[in-house]
Amino acid sequence: MAELKCILWDVDGTLADTERDGHRVAFNMAFEEAGLDRRWDVETYGELLTVTGGKERMKFDMERGGMPDMPYEKITALHARKTIHYQTLIADGLIPLRAGVLRLLEKAYAEGITLGISTTTTPAALDALIEHSLGKEWFERFAVLAAGDIVPLKKPAPDIYNYAMQELGVSPENTLALEDSGNGWLSAHGAGIKCVITINDYTAKQDFTGADLVVSELGEAERDSIQVLSNPHALDDLHHVTLSHLKNIMAS
């Protein structure tokens, strides 16, 4: 029977609903600032989310004729400006944590479960979210912050999860991932770890076949019950996801 010893969290769409009203808006601000005649509307950005990584999304959009041709150095510079705009949005309190995130983080930390981040977002964007949405104490509470280009291949490759587990010295059978996307699920699965999915508007129709739990959100006790989309472990009382539910997933 496997014991839950480590939880690795994705960031964008999992800790907070950052994509539509955060990253997308920041990209458009950077495009306008650079004088580019290109804006990503909600639908377009949803299409681009199939590509993991902001610089990679711009390159993909350029190659399909959306953005004008530019050298990779300009893409990198644009992405840096986008990150600055994103940090401002976070600092202004425009992107709160998703329901249940802080509750589960605090409960797991109190019980001595190792907590880490495994994300493709940039370290600067991650730092802004932690500082302004969680609190500076979480820089110490997360035992690893695996982010951005720290590994050669981004999700759906398993590299970022393998890196985090190696840094922490934990094994896949004792580690659980919290994700929101198909690419995230594939990354966790490829690393051999169990995975809970909290969907959002962009990822609701993606394929999560094989995931250990798929829900609309983690939820809160005082709110309406969450929507359970897949519950292969037959967990009981899923009004909201608790640490006990996550432990039961690991033990089953």
Image (cartoon, rainbow, N blue to C red):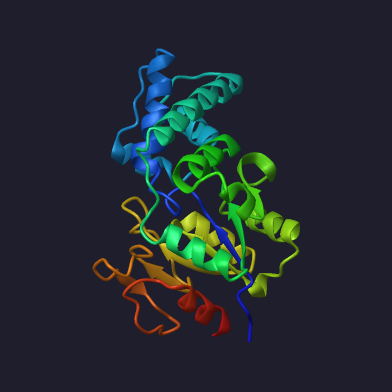
Considering depth in this image, is 224 or 75 the residue closer to the camera?
224
Q: Residue at x 27, y 71 (%)?
A: 225
Q: Can you say which quadrant of the picture contains the N terminus? A: bottom right
Considering depth in this image, is 201 or 167 the residue closer to the camera?
167
Q: Residue at x 43, y 22 (%)?
A: 30
Q: Is residue 248 above or below residue 220?
A: below
Residue positioned most to the top: 35
Where residue 193 sits, quadrant-wise, is bottom right
**225 sits to left or right of 137:** left
Q: Residue at x 65, y 40 (%)?
A: 149
On the question of residue 207 being in view, the answer is: no
Q: Residue at x 54, y 25 (%)?
A: 80
The number of numbered badges drawn on the structure is 0
How far across and down, in percent of the image, does residue 187 sit?
57, 58
On the question of residue 1 being in view, the answer is: yes
How far across and down, in percent of the image, does residue 106 sit?
50, 62
Considering depth in this image, is 156 or 83 the residue closer to the camera?
83
How far across and down, in percent of the image, does residue 38 sit?
36, 22
Where residue 27 sits, quadrant-wise, is top left
Q: Is residue 245 above or below residue 136?
A: below
How far across and down, in percent of the image, does residue 52 sit?
52, 44
Q: Can you say which quadrant of the picture contains the C terminus? A: bottom right
